[in-house]
Amino acid sequence: ACNKTVNATTTGTIEINNSPMTYWPNAFCTWTLSGMVPNKISLQVLNLPYENFNFTGVCLSDYVEVYDGQNSSSHLLGRYCQDKPVLGTIRSTGNIMHIVFRSDRLNEKGFLKAKYTAYNYPACKQDLTVLNERQII
C-alpha cells in the first residue's frame, strides 16, 4: 500500500506492485517513515522499476525520490531509477524519511521494494580530547 505514514520503530518493508512484475500507469505513491527521537532511518532499496533504462544516468520516467524529512520540501537525498541505482544504504539525519514513487504512462515493468530500519547511534561513553600531539586510542 502507498500514500501512508509508517511507524518505523524497528524494521519493515515498503513496496508497490499492482500484480507480479507490473505497476499501474501514472502512479504517484508516497511513504513517510517516522521513527522515535533520537532514532534515524536507514533505507535499503531491494528492487527498482526498470522502464527508464537508457544509460543516461538521468531518471525521467519512473523513479523513486528519497527526502531527509517529512515531505518533498525536505532535503532531497537522491533520485533513483534503473539508470541510477541506489549504491548502498540511504540514511536520514533525523527520525523522519519521505519517499516518493512516480511513474509515467508507459511500460510499467518491475516493482519497487525497499527495507527500512530504525536505528540509534550509541552514545559516547566519554569525551575525546584532541591535543596537538600524537596519541594512540
Image (tube, rainbow, N blue to C red):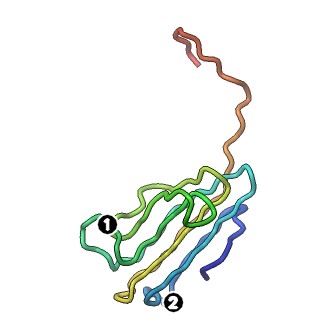
Which image quarter holds the C terminus? top right
Horizontal side of residue 28 vs 86, given as left or right: right
Compared with 91, 70 (above or below) is below
Residue beneath the point at 61% across and 82% down: 1
Task: State the image coordinates of residue 103 (x, y, percent, origin top left).
Answer: 42, 81
Q: Position of residue 117 (x, y in %)?
A: 63, 59
- Outermost residue to the front: 73
SS assignment at label 2: loop
Mark found first going from the N terminus, 2 or 1: 2
Dot 2 alpha-carbon crowd within 10 angstroms: few under 14, some 14 to 19, many 20 or more? few
**Callout 1 secondary element:** loop
Please say if 7 is above or below 75.
below
**Position of 80 relative to 21 (above/below):** above
Q: Quadrant of residue 124?
A: top right
Disc 1 marks which amino acid?
Val
**Residue name at image x 68 percent, y 72 percent:** 5
Q: Position of residue 99 (x, y in %)?
A: 55, 68
**Label 2 belongs to which residue?**
18
Q: Which residue is mark 1?
A: 58
User: Along the horizontal axis of the image, is 100 left or right of 126?
Assistant: left
Answer with left or right where residue 50 lies relative to residue 90: left
Q: Are marks 2 and 1 in contact (CB under 8 Å)?
A: no
Total numbered labels: 2
Residue 113 placement (x, y as % from top left): 51, 73
Residue drawn where x is 60% and y is 72% of the image: 31
**Is 19 in front, or is 3?**
3
> Is disc 1 surrounded by few (<14), some (14 to 19) or many (20+) residues within 10 Å?
some
Give the residue type at disc 2.
Answer: Asn
**What's the residue at 60%, 66% (across, down)?**
71
Residue 34's label in the rendered image is none
- Which mark is in front, 2 or 1? 1
